[in-house]
Amino acid sequence: MRNLIDLLLRKKVPALLAACIFVLFTALSGRCIAADTVRINGSGSALDMLKPLVEAYKMVDRNVRIEMEKPLGSSGAVKALLGGALDVAVSSRPLKPEEAAKGATLKEYGRTPLVIVTEKSVRKLDITTKELEEIYAGKTFKWQNGEKIRLVLRPREDIDTHILRTLSPGMNNAITASHSLPGMIISVTDPEAYTAVAKSPGGLGTTGLISIITEKLPLNTLSLNGIKPTPKNLASGAYPLFKEISFVTTPKTPPAALKFISFVYSSQGRVIAEKVGVLVTAKVITNR
């Protein structure tokens, strides 16, 4: 940039005009750089899914930089999107009417099993709905070896909490009871939740299968009522717990972001997503 100023001065362009040209050039250059930066955030599980997709996309378009900070969660990301702080949100819940009224549009992508997990040393392979009801209600508070169960909850309004409530009427009541118990661990985001389970002796909680695979989490994965949490069992309806993955955009979402989303929905993108635990339910779309 300094060379530009020197050139203008050698051509006898007045200093003030040269400075103005420099400022304008810098501003336009900044806009070009910003246009090639795609800002994405949302559900922790969905962001974990995007990590290998972003790496693959770098080989397709080297001129675009994709930024993904620590997860804001579905609600936080949609709010940031509508406020202009993001270009795309990835959500694990449907849009609220007020969000759609402000211009947000949701497109379904797929699902991933919501997995019951424990801290690595817990010697258990399967858990039943009845056992979960007893644990969440505070009626069972020790594992079979006598170790204390340290239950990691999500906030009352979190989508993971809602999904667990659908398991059974008894589970719905048990989760309500769990939030009234003293001294409970409550984690706001997906990474906070699975980290809390991994670091708590006797820990028990939930996380998406995507995170277990992509982050190589040191967790013990449980089957539920004898059914393993796999995309295949999810597709057949045998496994009941899952997290939705959808992309949320607005009319202001830039072309660079839409191009990346098209890659995620493409045949190549679907293969990558399926390898990390996603049951892709959306149709294949071509680049825009």
Image (tube, rainbow, N blue to C red):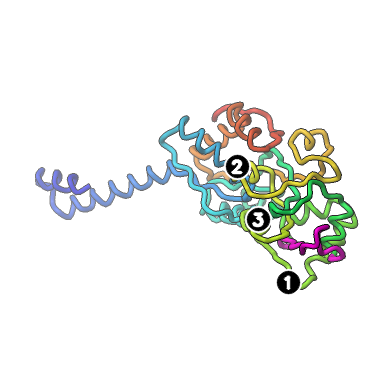
Callout 3: 10 Å neighbours few (<14), some, many (20+)? Answer: many
Q: Which residue is mark 1?
A: 183
Question: Of the numbered discs in the image, which one, if any, rests on residue 46?
Answer: none
**Residue 65, percent across and down?**
44, 42
Give the Cα distance between marks 1 and 2: 31 Å
In this view, the residue in front, 87 or 70, is 70
| Left or right side of 227 for 34 | left
Question: Of the numbered discs in the image, which one, if any, rests on residue 198?
Answer: 3
The residue depicted at 69 percent of the width and 38 percent of the height is 110
Give the Cα distance between marks 1 and 3: 18 Å
SS assignment at label 3: helix
The residue depicted at 41 percent of the width and 46 percent of the height is 34
In this view, the residue in front, 117 or 45, is 117
Q: Earlier in the sequence, mark 1 or mark 3?
A: 1
> Is-magenta flag for residue 183?
no
**Residue 146, percent across and down?**
80, 62
Three-letter residue code for mark 1? Gly
SS assignment at label 2: helix
Q: Quadrant of residue 264?
A: top right
- Residue 152 against residue 87 in the figure, above or below: below
Task: Specify the quadrant that holds the C terminus.
Answer: top right
Q: Is residue 75 visible?
A: no
Q: Nearer the viewer, mark 3 or mark 2?
A: 3
Q: Earlier in the sequence, mark 3 or mark 2?
A: 3
Three-letter residue code for mark 3? Ala
- The magenta-colored residue range is 138-155
Q: Which residue is mark 2?
A: 214
Three-letter residue code for mark 2? Thr
Q: Quadrant of residue 152?
A: bottom right
**Residue 274, percent across and down?**
66, 33
Q: Is residue 124 visible?
A: yes
Callout 2: 10 Å neighbours few (<14), some, many (20+)? Answer: some
